[in-house]
Image (cartoon, helix red, strand yellow):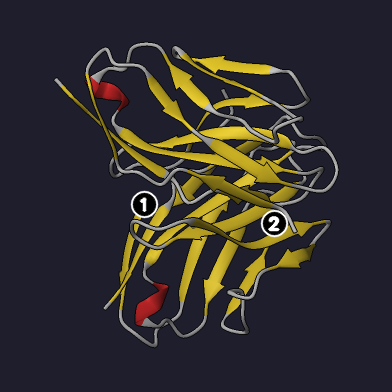
Amino acid sequence: EPEVTQTPSHQVTQMGQEVILRCVPISNHLYFYWYRQILGQKVEFLVSFYNNEISEKSEIFDDQFSVERPDGSNFTLKIRSTKLEDSAMYFCASSDEGMRGYTFGSGTRLTVV
Amino acid sequence: GNSVTQMEGPVTLSEEAFLTINCTYTATGYPSLFWYVQYPGEGLQLLLKATKADDKGSNKGFEATYRKETTSFHLEKGSVQVSDSAVYFCALKTSYDKVIFGPGTSLSVIP
């Protein structure tokens, strides 16, 4: 079964550093998403991306965050200057043109120290 | 706006007990409904889904029926196992929109 692949599985970074989380969506999917889950809390929507642009973003997705699809396969989330409160599990997801296929990756655990 | 409410738990059950986790939603239009499961230390796995009213999603002994009249999608399992211990998230999605998650229900099954 096709998978969404996220790397790395765990990243530790110092406060103020830039971090890039990487995702390889399912190849024929057109819609891409990032979510985050602070430990023990709700899964929160960050951003959706379609046709090479952001289609929707949440209040969490401020100027410190950006997304990019640098080539035909990768989808990245960049945090420019990490804060302690950015520590969370970040999930990438992709979807096809319908309500059927919506697949999450296994997540990247980001720890900001 | 769209939202999902579910019992937050934690829920503790003995093995082979009957499980119900309530979920209700508010949505414009006709959403698809999902249950996701998150095992300790792992990511989100789709457990089951239903895309229209009266559909029943089922997987691994779990079931949920899309009830439009009560805007509910309660998760049930007739006999839980220790391996079912996890956090369960009810969620909805409209069209190509984002998935909106409920707060999650932690389930612990004891032998």
Question: At which x and y percent is residue B62?
Answer: 47, 17
Image quarter where the C terminus of chain A lies is bottom left
Q: Which residue is at 54% across, 72% downward?
A: A78
Q: Which residue is at 43% across, 26% downward?
A: B20
Observer-nearest residue: B77 or A110?
B77
Q: Does the image show residue A24?
A: no
Q: Which residue is mark 1?
A: A9
Discs 2 and 1 share one subunit: yes
Observer-nearest residue: B66 or A106?
B66
Q: Is residue B20 above or below residue A17?
A: above
Question: At which x and y percent is residue A45?
Answer: 60, 59
Instruction: State which chain disc 2 sits on.
Output: A
Q: Which residue is at 51% across, 15% downward?
A: B59
User: Which mark is drawn over residue A86?
Assistant: none
Q: Which sits earlier in the primary sequence, circle 2 or circle 1?
A: 1
Find residue A83 and report its image quarter. Answer: bottom left
Q: Which residue is mark 2?
A: A71
Tell us which disc is closer to us: 2 or 1.
1
**Local secondary structure at mark 2:** loop
Question: In the drawing, does residue B111 fall left or right of residue A108?
Answer: left
Q: Does the image show residue B17?
A: yes
Query: Dot 1: within a 10 Å radius of its alpha carbon, few (fewer than 14), some, or many (20 or more) residues?
Result: some
Image quarter where the N terminus of chain A lies is top right
Q: Is residue A37 above or below residue B80?
A: below
Find residue A66 and report its image quarter. Answer: bottom right
Q: Are marks 2 and 1 in contact (CB under 8 Å)?
A: no
Observer-nearest residue: A49 or B49?
B49
Instruction: State which chain disc 1 sits on.
Output: A
Query: What amino acid is at disc 2?
Result: Asp
Q: CA distance from mark 2 to mark 1?
A: 21 Å
Question: In the drawing, does residue B88 fall left or right of residue A95?
Answer: left
